[in-house]
Image: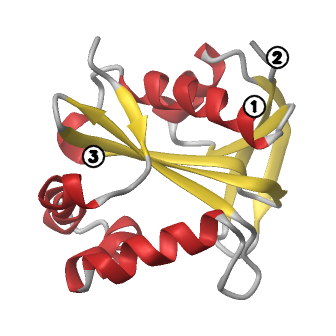
């Protein structure tokens, strides 16, 4: 894991990211597969959308400016993190996922740790994160990154209870 880094989505990792998207299809995870499906249909358009969203341009209705980064290990995309420039109710500032092929290997902790450094550069001084109360892996990742539990909230759109956390960020 010493070669781990976050990178802005780009053509260099196209094949790896396509495999990443397909890993969700293989496990029938429609939520994440649908999130990344456009990359399989038109990679250039997908990259342009991510670039636009990071600058707050052409945002889908109800969305906020969001910077996306890929977690790369040995030239392979193993995770994706989205940093929202403003807190979004029931989603917070940061959302991340690790490829089903690379879970339970420590990548969750690393992707959040690196994302918190990016969040500081974006101007976030207190990152809000949420996770489903049944997602013990994400709960551990957030707490290991100094997440302080604020309480439990209910996400009506997803019909699920979430833990809401705060992580105070200190510029380095």
In the rendered view, does 123 fall on the left or right side of 105? right
In the rendered view, does 171 fall on the left or right side of 161? right
Whole-percent x and y of residue 148? 80, 22
- Asked which quadrant contains residue 168, the reply is top right
Tell me which residue sits at (72%, 66%) in the image: 65
Mark 2 and mark 3: span between their CA atoms? Answer: 29 Å
At label 2, counting other C-alpha atoms closer than 10 Å, the crowd grade (few under 14, some 14-19, many 20 or more) is few
Along the line of sight, which residue is nearer the eye, 161 or 109? 109
Along the line of sight, which residue is nearer the eye, 171 or 131? 171
Q: Is residue 132 above or below residue 48?
A: above
At label 3, counting other C-alpha atoms closer than 10 Å, the crowd grade (few under 14, some 14-19, many 20 or more) is many
**Residue tagged by mark 3?**
99
Give the secondary structure at mark 2.
loop
Q: Is residue 109 above or below residue 123?
A: above
Q: Earlier in the sequence, mark 3 or mark 1?
A: 3
Badge nearest the viewer, 2 or 3: 2
Give the secondary structure at mark 1.
helix
Mark 3 and mark 1: span between their CA atoms? Answer: 25 Å
Tell me which residue sits at (66%, 70%) in the image: 159
Q: Earlier in the sequence, mark 2 or mark 3?
A: 3
Tell me which residue sits at (65%, 29%) in the image: 116
- The answer to whether marks 2 and 1 mark residues whose Cβ atoms lie closer than 8 Å is yes
Q: Is residue 153 above or below residue 31?
A: above
Along the line of sight, which residue is nearer the eye, 29 or 12? 12
Tell me which residue sits at (62%, 44%) in the image: 131
Give the secondary structure at mark 3.
loop
**Residue tagged by mark 2?**
170
Q: Earlier in the sequence, mark 2 or mark 1?
A: 1
Mark number displayed over residue 120 = 1
């Amino acid at each position: 894991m010493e070669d781990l880094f976050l990178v802005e989505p780009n053509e260099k990792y196209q094949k790896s990211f396509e495999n990443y998207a397909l890993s969700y299809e293989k496990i029938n995870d429609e939520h994440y597969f649908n999130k990344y499906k456009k990359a399989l249909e038109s990679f250039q358009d997908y990259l342009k959308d991510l670039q636009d969203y990071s600058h707050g341009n052409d945002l889908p209705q109800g969305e906020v400016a969001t910077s996306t980064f890929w977690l790369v290990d040995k030239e392979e995309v193993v995770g994706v993190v989205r940093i929202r420039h403003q807190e979004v109710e029931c989603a917070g500032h940061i959302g991340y996922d690790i490829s089903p092929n690379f879970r339970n290997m420590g990548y969750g902790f690393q992707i959040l740790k690196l994302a918190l450094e990016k969040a500081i550069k974006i101007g976030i001084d207190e990152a809000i994160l949420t996770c489903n109360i049944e997602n013990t892996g994400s709960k551990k990742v957030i707490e290991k990154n100094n997440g302080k539990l604020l309480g439990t909230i209910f996400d009506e759109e997803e019909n699920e209870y979430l833990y809401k956390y705060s992580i105070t960020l200190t510029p380095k």
